[in-house]
Image: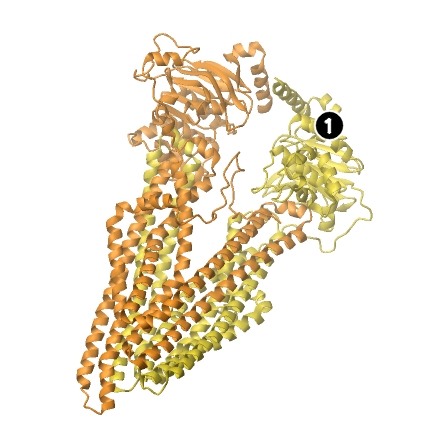
């Protein structure tokens, strides 16, 4: 049975065409040794090389201080203890006071060394975390800013949730790598190498035994961890299946009940639940086996060392103190060996996360889509062949006019490999003209304006503002001149004032209030508990749809644009708000070049010109009266509108 | 201890219902703690001590030491087996417990309707069924196991040390107590900061979510920098909380280390002096180190377990609130099944309100067996509510909806569902194969599935998919278009072969050509059945013998298509508008 093994994440919208599978969080393990990826990761840490160097020093320091412990035990046993025993055996006088004095000195050294080590441990934690958090903080900010500058088409292809996960969980996974991952692995490896070297230095004959067995232990550990990891992965997958099933049945609870499907749904859940349980038990088996096995192996190493050490002790090759220190050092080696495999796994997950993060960072920002402006007017002219280039038209280099002229020339557009949305559209909007676009659903109205704001780029043909091809004008510049009121008003969970100001710090509170007054939003705003400082819910759900539209008008007016793009909302509002919106529309559109996707009769009737868009082409155009007289498509749409609003 | 109803186990009253079936397994694992821990903390240290001391004072030959080494390895193997059994049984029991608990939760949810759980977010139910359940399981499994282990190991370790050297043992108590105190003391601030950090992460996530979702507005108002600044400020707060947390954790682990070092220091100093005096041997000395190492970890586990209890308790409480939700529609106390099922449907003077907002007023309808009734009206006129009431997705007032002469509230629910099939407005399909979706009502032969698909005019579409009827739907499979979904849902209901069919606006996403084809098929499928077609499309209503126009919850017009057109009222308006739309479409 092949059911989905994707984690259940509530999905708000059905996935658009070609959307990436946003639900597979845990990729197949990418190679940890991916050089290119490693280089980029090291690049992130480069500004922190001093902290990194400090961390290395601290780690080495703490290791050295730790190794002193057994050395002190060695000194204790081979010194005072052996001396006392020898004296006792020989029946000689024993300077107990002197020997105890020596022990106090050794204990003092131990105390100082370990106190120092504790300090270093805290320092290590602070240095590494500060560095890791800073790296991740910078990376997250970079990623966020980058995402906001990606072309709108990118958002058509990626779920918002998927992208959010990149900036949160994935970046966090990287923080783990910088704070604990790399440093701990380095420390563990260092630990193993240094201790083995130390063992050989202290007692080469004795060191042979553990060094022969340790690799076995390491292999077993890696093998176990690998199996445990695979089992764990399977468990995660079956949990995801279980969750996906649960979520779907919860949403489709009615269907399950209407089709009397409860018993079988319950059985199916039981199957998935049992599968999850069984996979869990496999994981449990691996972990239950792992710790006792490694522990037994370490005991075996110690016992083998003991037996072999007994021979060397009797031979006199090794002292009892050396043997004891040896024994204690061995203890230090077991832990890194046990943990190394797991740390490697953490690193692997971090690498997979890094790959996804870099994948997003590698996506091209929309600024890259801006073309170089044609060098001379001649170039511009050649671009407007067939266009309506008029004498005296501002081409390039001229300062922008307050009420610019817009032109669509033979524009073709479709989304991905979808059907044609705009099919060789040509029209223009004179300076200060208010053009209403009407058409049935799916006529391409919204797409048309998104080409003007450079949310999408025309596939062929040209969109011009004052004669300049918009593709040669940087995005910010285009958008600075245009204010857009979107059909589905998007408000941020911030104050009303901030939603009108939209980050333009040059606007005073008086400007905000003036804008709100002009579109008749002021009255309802001041009635709210905190007036302009009222914080909106996510998407402004604590306002009515009419109020949200008025805020959007105030926002557009405050921006004082040269061009206004209005995508009227279709939602019905009460008659009072309707009147306010009508009046606000008049205020907003006066003395500006306006492109309005109109749903309100009042907007259409008062427009200077109406473009009737149908199946991607301009079907008719003219004034309301002229078009009605034509008795064509507009006439029909008008009557349909009347029929619907009756 | 307080009364049982308020004891520490009180919040787990429901959870404990699932414990008896796993008790045997659990107990087996718990018993194995005893041999495993005693070998670890008593037998092995004693054997090692014996060997090392023998070696030191020369009473043992190399062969003897080898023998004792082998004894220790043998003991280690027994210990390993016991420890494996302990984990295997206890964790296994806790997993089985979790499974029973979850299944019961799911079966409870299946009794509810979406309306019953409307006040709970799906995400919350999901997290309760996973995280909260996990917290309860952890308490029953691993944490009880580790605490029990600590209860055996720590006293045994202390007794061992007392046996070896009482002065040293008493001194060793200090680090042990300090350790538990540190772990417990650090738990609260750590939990606090970890929560703060989680909240900041949630904030970050919200800001990212909002700006990415509203990216067009962000771009339109060139707000990228402002958004980045806000994001940066939140990131800063998150970073601060994380650093606080890291500092706390650093201090915790360093203090644990210091405590352990103090233990070693005591052994070193006092043990060293004792050795010089000849009171203890090197073997005793080494055993002290070993016991210190092995008894340390259970003490840490106890501190950890204390934090877990709180989490498990609130988890169990949250799970209880789910179990406490009562199903809205249930079987009558003594259900009545009509002697003959013909499909005679009648609505008598039905008045209905959602939360005191009136939706239907004095609606009376009759759909004699074998006839088709069309219902139309503007958005919000109460059409869909009527569909929900006659299929008993919501309880109508008593005596208002009768099927074959029996109030549907008195029908056995399962039999009613068998007799009345509905294609809901919101066509929800599951991520299964298309065949499974169509055969959702029961085990059906492939021919029946295909026959239903043919009538719903979706057969050809399905045949066009790479895997035909076995094509998986959903995230991993194909995504159907709105029209295909509706047609599949129609096939699903037709395949159930009920006496009464209710089609709630189920052709809205289908183009007019396909619509005609489906209607053709439905005309045949309706033969001998009672059907109610709810639609705002005149074409769909053409199948109906009679049509009812609802307006503001009342029956406004009623008659055949021709009669209603003749009347020149609401129905005639709808008809005119649709003609106009068809003309525009055809341009």
Q: Is residue B395 above or below residue B23?
A: above
Which percent across, then down, holds residue B42?
Answer: 42, 80
- Colour chain B appears in: yellow
Which percent across, then down, holds residue B411?
Answer: 74, 49
Q: Residue furthest bottom?
A: A91
Q: Is residue B10 left or right of residue A521?
A: right
For label 1, the residue is: B542
Q: Is residue A181 left or right of residue A451?
A: left
Location of the C terminus of chain A by quadrant is top right
Q: Residue furthest top?
A: A391
Given residues A389 and A178, the one toward you in this image is A178
Secondary element at tag 1: loop
Residue B56 seen in this snapshot: yes
Q: Is residue B584 left or right of residue B5?
A: right
Asked which colour scheme the image uses, the reply is by chain
Residue at the spot 35% in from the left edge and 14% down from the top edge: A379
- Colour chain A appears in: orange
Which percent across, then down, holds residue A172?
Answer: 38, 49
Q: Is residue A525 above or below residue A255?
A: above
């Amino acid at each position: 049975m092949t059911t989905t093994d994707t984690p259940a994440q509530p999905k708000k919208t059905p996935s658009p065409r070609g959307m990436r599978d946003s639900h597979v969080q845990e990729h197949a393990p990418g190679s940890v040794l991916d050089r290119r990826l490693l280089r980029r990761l090291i690049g992130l840490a480069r500004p922190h090389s001093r902290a990194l160097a400090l961390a290395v020093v601290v780690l080495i320091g703490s290791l050295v201080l730790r190794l002193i412990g057994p050395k002190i035990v060695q000194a204790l046993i081979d010194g005072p203890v052996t001396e006392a025993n020898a004296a006792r055996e020989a029946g000689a006088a024993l300077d107990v006071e002197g020997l105890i004095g020596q022990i106090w000195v050794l204990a003092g050294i131990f105390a100082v060394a370990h106190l120092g080590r504790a300090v270093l441990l805290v320092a290590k934690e602070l240095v590494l975390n500060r560095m890791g958090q800073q790296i991740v903080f910078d990376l997250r900010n970079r990623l966020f800013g980058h995402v906001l500058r990606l072309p709108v088409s990118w958002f058509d292809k990626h779920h918002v949730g998927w992208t959010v996960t990149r900036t949160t969980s994935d970046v966090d996974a990287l923080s783990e790598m910088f704070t604990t991952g790399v440093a701990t692995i380095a420390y563990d490896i260092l630990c193993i190498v240094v201790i083995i070297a130390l063992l050989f230095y202290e007692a080469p004959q004795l060191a042979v035994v553990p060094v022969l067995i340790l690799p076995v232990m390491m292999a077993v550990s890696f093998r176990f961890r690998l199996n445990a990891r695979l089992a764990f992965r399977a468990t995660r997958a079956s949990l995801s299946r279980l969750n996906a099933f649960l979520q779907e049945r919860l949403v489709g609870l009615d269907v399950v009940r209407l089709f009397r499907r409860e018993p079988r749904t319950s059985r199916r859940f039981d199957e998935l639940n049992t599968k999850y349980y069984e996979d869990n038990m496999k994981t449990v088996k691996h972990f239950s086996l792992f710790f006792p096995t490694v522990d037994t192996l370490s005991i075996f190493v110690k016992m083998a060392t003991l037996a072999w050490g007994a021979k060397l002790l009797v031979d006199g090759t090794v002292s009892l103190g050396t043997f004891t220190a040896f024994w204690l050092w061995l203890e230090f080696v077991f832990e890194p060996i046990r943990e190394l495999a797991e740390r490697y796994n953490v690193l692997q997950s971090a690498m997979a996360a890094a790959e996804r993060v870099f994948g997003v960072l590698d996506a091209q920002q929309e600024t890259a889509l801006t073309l170089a402006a044609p060098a001379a007017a001649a170039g511009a002219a050649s671009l407007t062949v067939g266009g309506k280039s008029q004498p005296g038209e501002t081409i390039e280099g001229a300062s922008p006019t307050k009420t610019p002229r817009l032109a669509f020339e033979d524009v073709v557009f479709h989304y991905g490999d979808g059907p044609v949305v705009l099919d060789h559209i040509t029209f223009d909007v004179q300076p200060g003209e208010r053009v209403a676009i009407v058409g049935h659903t799916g006529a391409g109205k919204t797409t048309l304006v998104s080409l003007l704001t450079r949310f999408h780029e025309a596939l062929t043909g040209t969109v011009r503002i004052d004669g300049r091809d918009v593709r040669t004008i940087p995005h910010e510049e285009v958008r600075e001149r245009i204010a857009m009121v979107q059909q589905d008003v998007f408000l941020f969970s911030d104050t009303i004032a901030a939603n009108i100001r939209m980050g333009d710090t040059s606007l005073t509170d008086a400007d905000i209030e003036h804008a709100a007054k002009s579109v008749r939003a002021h009255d309802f705003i001041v009635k709210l508990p905190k007036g302009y400082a009222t914080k909106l819910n996510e998407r402004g759900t604590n306002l009515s749809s009419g109020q949200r539209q008025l805020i959007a008008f105030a926002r557009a007016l405050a921006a004082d644009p040269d061009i206004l793009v209005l995508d009227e909302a279709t939602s019905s509002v009460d008659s009072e708000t309707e009147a306010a919106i009508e009046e606000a529309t008049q205020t907003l559109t006066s003395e500006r070049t306006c492109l309005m996707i109109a749903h309100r009769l009042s907007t259409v009737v008062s427009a200077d010109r109406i473009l009737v868009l149908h199946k991607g082409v301009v079907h008719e155009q003219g004034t309301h009266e002229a078009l009605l007289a034509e008795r064509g498509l507009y006439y029909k749409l008008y009557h349909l509108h009347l029929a619907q609003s009756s | 201890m307080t009364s049982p109803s308020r004891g520490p186990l009180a919040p787990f009253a429901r959870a404990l219902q699932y414990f008896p079936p796993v008790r045997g397994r659990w107990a087996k694992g718990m018993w194995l703690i005893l041999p495993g821990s005693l070998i670890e903390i008593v037998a092995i240290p004693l054997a090692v001590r014996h060997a090392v001391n023998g070696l030191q004072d020369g009473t043992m030959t190399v062969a003897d030491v080898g023998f004792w080494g082998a004894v220790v390895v043998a003991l280690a193997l027994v210990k390993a087996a016991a420890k494996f059994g302990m984990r295997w049984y206890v964790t296994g029991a806790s997993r089985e417990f979790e499974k029973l608990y979850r299944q019961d939760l799911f079966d409870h949810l299946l009794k509810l309707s979406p309306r019953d759980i409307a006040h709970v977010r799906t995400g919350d139910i999901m997290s309760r069924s996973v995280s909260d359940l996990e917290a309860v399981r952890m308490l029953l499994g691993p944490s009880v196991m580790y605490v029990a282990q600590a209860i055996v190991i720590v006293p045994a370790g202390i007794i061992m040390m007392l046996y070896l050297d009482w002065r040293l043992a008493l001194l060793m108590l200090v680090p042990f107590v300090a350790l538990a105190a540190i772990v417990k003391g650090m738990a609260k601030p750590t939990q606090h900061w970890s929560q703060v950090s989680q909240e900041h992460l949630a904030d970050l996530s919200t800001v990212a979510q909002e700006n990415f979702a509203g990216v067009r507005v962000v771009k339109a108002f060139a707000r990228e920098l402002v958004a980045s600044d806000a994001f940066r400020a939140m990131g800063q707060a998150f970073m601060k909380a994380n650093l606080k947390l890291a500092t706390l954790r650093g201090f915790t682990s360093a203090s644990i280390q210091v405590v352990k070092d103090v233990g070693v220091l005591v052994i070193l100093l006092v043990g060293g002096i004792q050795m010089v005096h000849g009171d203890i041997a090197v073997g005793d000395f080494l055993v002290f180190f070993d016991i210190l190492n092995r008894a340390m970890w259970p003490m840490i586990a106890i501190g950890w377990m204390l934090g877990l209890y709180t989490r498990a308790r609130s988890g169990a409480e949250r799970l209880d609130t789910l179990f406490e939700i009562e199903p809205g529609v249930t079987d009558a106390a003594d259900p009545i099944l009509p002697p003959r099922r013909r499909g005679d449907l009648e609505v008598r003077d039905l008045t209905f309100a959602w939360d005191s907002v009136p939706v239907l007023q004095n609606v009376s309808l009759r759909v004699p067996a074998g006839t088709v009734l069309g219902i139309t009206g503007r958005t919000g006129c109460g059409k869909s509510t009527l569909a929900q009431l006659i299929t008993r997705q919501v309880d109508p007032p008593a005596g208002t909806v009768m099927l074959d002469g029996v109030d549907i509230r008195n029908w056995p629910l399962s039999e009613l569902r068998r007799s009345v099939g509905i294609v809901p407005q919101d066509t929800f399909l599951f991520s299964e194969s298309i065949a499974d979706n169509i055969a959702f009502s029961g085990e059906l032969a492939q021919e029946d599935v295909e026959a239903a698909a043919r009538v719903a005019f979706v057969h050809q579409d399905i045949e066009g998919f790479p895997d035909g009827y076995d094509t998986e739907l959903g995230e991993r499979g194909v995504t159907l278009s709105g029209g295909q979904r509706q047609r599949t849902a129609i096939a699903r209901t037709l395949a159930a072969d009920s006496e009464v069919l209710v089609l709630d606006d189920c052709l809205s996403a289908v183009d007019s050509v396909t619509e005609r084809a489906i209607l053709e098929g439905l005309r045949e499928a309706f033969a001998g059945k009672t059907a109610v077609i709810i639609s705002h499309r005149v074409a769909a209503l053409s199948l109906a013998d009679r049509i009812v126009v609802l307006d503001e919850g009342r029956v406004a017009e009623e008659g055949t298509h021709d009669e209603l057109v003749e009347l020149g009222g609401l129905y005639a308006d709808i008809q005119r508008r649709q003609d106009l739309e068809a003309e525009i479409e055809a341009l």
